[in-house]
Amino acid sequence: MAVFAQSAPCWVDVQLSDLEAGKRFYGGLFGWTFRAGDGMPFADAYSDGRLVAALAAKQDGRMPTTWGVYFATDDILATVALIRKAGGQVITDPVRAGRAGVLAQAADPGGAVFGLWQAGDRAGFEKQNAPGSFCWTEVYTRQPERVDAFYEEVFGFQGTDIELPGGEDGSGQPEPFRVWSPAGTEPGEDTAIGGRAVITDAFPEMMPSYFLNYFAVADCVGVAGNAVRLGGRITAPPMDIPYGRMAVLQDDQGAAFAVLQPTELLP
């Protein structure tokens, strides 16, 4: 069983109104295959026969249609206590998911929701950082100083500030961005496992803080086009960034995610 370092992203899932439609969309987009969860309202997703994500049917129509990321913890009760102490909110107290493990959901001080996972029989991804699988996550927030302090205290993240060219607000100004490295590593882009972006005043005030999860692909432009053909939308068209070529998409039910064609896979 794969072992994930403390606080590393280890899992993603998406909450959908129509599970079967979701399987058609992501099966068509990423070539995923699916296995039902023993009569439960979810389906595990596989790429090249290896576990990469899960699709879940929403149990309450008021729940958001969204991709969620989970961070690994060796002691979920202690992490939940740290979240409360650091000014976060615990949305779902730790609950056992059969023999697979224990999960909880929380929100940072800016309101961005994330999950915790304490592994049992299931550690998390069996494939990542390769086409068809998770490769990155970043939180978008209006309260960067407060949120940075929260993740440093709860997960031990070490931040490195960089500037990305352009900026999503269309201003053309450099975009402030922080990448996170796990505790015990040399902070920097080479060890980063996630990041923090700032929601500027150029965006509507009602836009909440959120996590954006990335999947690696071999052809960013082709995948973006396929998403549209499958009923989804392109919300940020393919663009070149220092790490490759990326696009932000929505599936046919409105769940947002990003795709990244790493630099080494560019022509």
Image: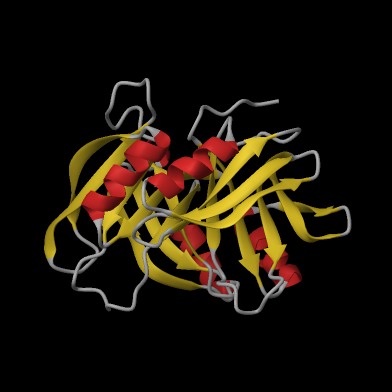
- The residue that appears at 60% across and 79% down in the rendered structure is 62
x 37%, y 52%: residue:
87
Q: How far from the left and from the top, in percent, is residue 197?
A: 28, 54
Q: How many marks?
A: 0
Q: Please state the horizontal and vertical placement of residue 77, each as a whole percent of the image.
A: 58, 39
Figure colour scheme:
secondary structure
Q: In which quadrant of the rendered view does residue 193 lie?
A: top left
Image x and y of residue 65, in percent: 57, 71
x and y percentages locating residue 24 in the rendered image: 71, 66
Drawn side of residue 144 relative to residue 90, left or right: left
Query: Which residue occupies the foreground of this view, 90 or 207?
Result: 90
Of 236 and 221, which appears nearest the observer?
236
Residue 76 left/right relative to 1: left
Task: Examine the rendering and report whether any part of residue 149 can be seen.
Answer: yes
Instruction: Identify the image quadrant of the N terminus.
Output: top right
Side of 163 where 219 appears, left or right: right
Residue 125 visible from this viewpoint: no
Task: Choose between 155 and 67: the one closer to the eye.
Answer: 155
Query: Can you say which quadrant of the picture contains the C terminus?
Result: top left
The residue at 58%/32% (across/down) is: 75
> 180 above or below 42?
above
Residue appearing at x 26%, y 62% in the figure: 142
Given the current orientation, which residue lies at the most extreme left position? Answer: 173
